[in-house]
Image (cartoon, grey):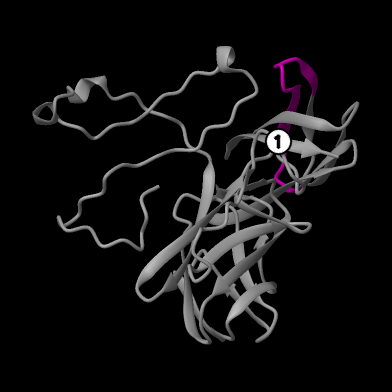
Amino acid sequence: MYNPGYTYQAEGFKPFTSYFLKTNSSSATELLFTSNLTERQGIPASKAVAIKTDETILLGLNVDKTDYSTIIRIKQDATSEYDLLYDAPYIAPMLTTTPQIYSIIGSNQYALNSVPEKSIVSIGIKVPFSGTYTFNWNVSRISVPVSLTDKVTGETINMNTTENYTFTTTSGYINSRFILNIDQKVYTENINGMYREIRIIGKEKSIQIENLSENTKISTYEISGKLLNTQIYSPGTAIINVPEAGLYLLELTNTHNSIKTKVICR
């Protein structure tokens, strides 16, 4: 990414934009980009190809009107530990006075951290001076409840309904004060004007579905698409056993709703 701390002479001009890409096999990788270039810029707009994006949280630290960012990605087949294919280590800037923001796994810092639902992510920062700073974020594409907890003040901020949080701190590294709380996705169905929340929770070799409505058909598949089980359930909570830990596909269908999702079992 371009250096956000550099003031370019031409308004809005940035010399380049770079992207981080990590795969397990270059021969099995297909990279698709969406472009907003027009024909006047030399590339027909019809050449643009849509790319499916993951749910990500872009968390920024604002210092002297400049944002420094880290990325948290919600991905069901990721873990709360380091994932070789999904995480990217943080590389500290050359200047020791440059502000920093990163997520933390163990004692290591990350620029990109992929985690499943129901995760807690430690956020670390480094600031050059004591003073007042602001976190800002964009969670417009997030379908799970997300909050930020400040352990010093005891505040927990709902990130789905607010856009920033201002705090005061001393200079240096602050690695044990802030955490992101990523909750379980909640599905909502409308039954004659009344809304019901459905929770799908991956457990040890089982899947728990809470708050089912009457006559809900649930089909469970392996990630390969192989059907494991289909059953119609009564209202309440359903427990579906699976053969082993892993990622499964779930389809819920009734007269009010149809839900297709992935769930990981430990």
* 92 in relation to 50, above or below: below
* 103 in relation to 258, above or below: below
Left or right, residue 186 beside residue 48: right
Tell me which residue sits at (41%, 65%) in the image: 67
Residue 174 rendering spot, x and y as whole percentages:
65, 75
The residue range painted magenta reads 210-229
The reply to whether the magenta stretch includes residue 226 is yes
Residue 152 rendering spot, x and y as whole percentages:
68, 84
Tell me which residue sits at (17%, 58%) in the image: 9
Camera-nearest residue between 105 and 59 = 105
What residue is shown with label 1? 84
The reply to whether the magenta stretch includes residue 150 is no
Residue 183 rendering spot, x and y as whole percentages:
68, 57
Residue 105 rendering spot, x and y as whole percentages:
74, 55
Camera-nearest residue between 36 and 103 = 103
Left or right, residue 193 beside residue 43: right
| Quadrant (top left/top right/bottom left/bottom right) for the C terminus | top right
Q: Kindly state the secondary structure of the residue where label 1 is placed.
A: loop
Q: Is residue 193 among the parts visible in the rendering?
A: no
* 229 in relation to 246, above or below: above
Tell me which residue sits at (45%, 62%) in the image: 68
Instruction: Please name the amino acid that badge 1 sits on.
Output: Leu
The image shows a total of numbered marks equal to: 1
Q: Is residue 219 among the parts visible in the rendering?
A: yes
Q: Does the magenta stretch mainly form a helix, a strand or a loop? A: strand
Residue 35, picture quadrant: top left
Left or right, residue 61 beside residue 152: left
Q: Residue furthest top?
A: 27
Camera-nearest residue between 124 and 143 = 124
